[in-house]
Image (spheres, grey):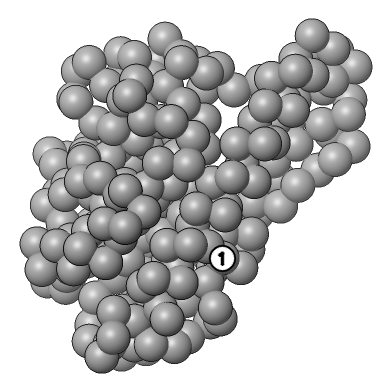
Amino acid sequence: MRVGIVIALAAEARTLAGGEGAFLGDGRYRVRVSGPGPRRAAAAAGDLLADGCEALLSFGLAGGLAPELRAGALIVANAVHTAQHGPLACDRTLHDALLARLDAVGAVSASVYGADTPIITSDDKHVLHARLGVAAVDMESAAIARVAHDRQRPCAVLRCVVDPAGFTLPHAALAGMAEDGGSRPFATAAALLRHPLELPDLIRLALWYGGALRALRGAGALLCG
């Protein structure tokens, strides 16, 4: 099976061995870096299917919603909840294959939420988890799953938690994120001048971010080796 992997950020894509290669032993994968957000993710997913991929995988980082999940936790989604539609089921065969391959690194099966905008505060995370039972949130998986379902193709999701459920994202981190997913260090510095008390949380988030990328790299090695 040829699996098209949609990844929002270049930093996430660098956790894989390359832009294409072997996947789950006898399959193949091809990567498309979309940029953040549902519109870009949907376009990349459609391009991968048009290029001959037979299934889609949403791969990357996520915000934690379930309180028991720590930074670095790996989630293989069994379904993707959306604001506009009901939950979209992930392909069972792909889900089970990913979960089995990642058992050694403690990946868990859970549902995730596809948001249109970042979920920032710990209160908002708590409300979303309590209402839907979702374990994590990102802004691409729902769009990718929708493309797969519309075109009757298998879809899977692998996400790694960066910020745990009890953590509110600092203003400086959000200010430093460019629209294309890159970083804006001067905007981060300016935001820190306005909110200097956020520095400890910003450092904590940076450490979690690095750890989550290492966890993704380990997962990628198991899937694509």
Crowding around mark 1 (Cα neighbors within 10 Å: few <14, some 14 to 19, many 20+) is some
Q: Position of residue 172 (x, y in %)?
A: 75, 25
Q: Which of the two residues, 90 or 143, is positioned nearer the viewer here?
A: 90
Note whether 124 is above or below 184 in the view shown.
above
Q: Is residue 109 left or right of residue 210?
A: left
Q: Is residue 18 left or right of residue 164?
A: right
> Which residue is at 20% across, 46% downward?
109
Instruction: Kindly give the residue lying farthest to the front in the view shown.
Output: 104
- Work out whether residue 15 can be spotted: yes
Note whether 213 is above or below 190 in the view shown.
below
**Amino acid residing under circle 1:** Thr
Q: Which of the two residues, 215 or 88, is positioned nearer the viewer here?
A: 215
Q: Quadrant of residue 49?
A: bottom left
Note whether 208 is above or below 47 in the view shown.
above
> Which residue is at 48% across, 62% downward?
218
> Which residue is at 40% across, 41% downward?
73
Q: Is residue 19 left or right of residue 174?
A: left
Q: Position of residue 171 (x, y in %)?
A: 69, 21
- Work out whether residue 50 can be spotted: no
Q: In which quadrant of the rendered image does the C terminus lie?
A: bottom left
Q: In which quadrant of the rendered image does the N terminus lie?
A: bottom left
Q: Position of residue 86 (x, y in %)?
A: 12, 39
> Which residue is at 33% across, 24% downward?
68
- Counting every numbered tag in the picture gives 1
Q: Which of the two residues, 121 or 161, is positioned nearer the viewer here?
A: 161
Q: Position of residue 83 (x, y in %)?
A: 26, 33
Q: Secondary structure at mark 1?
A: loop
* Residue labelled with disc 1: 15
Q: Is residue 167 left or right of residue 45?
A: right
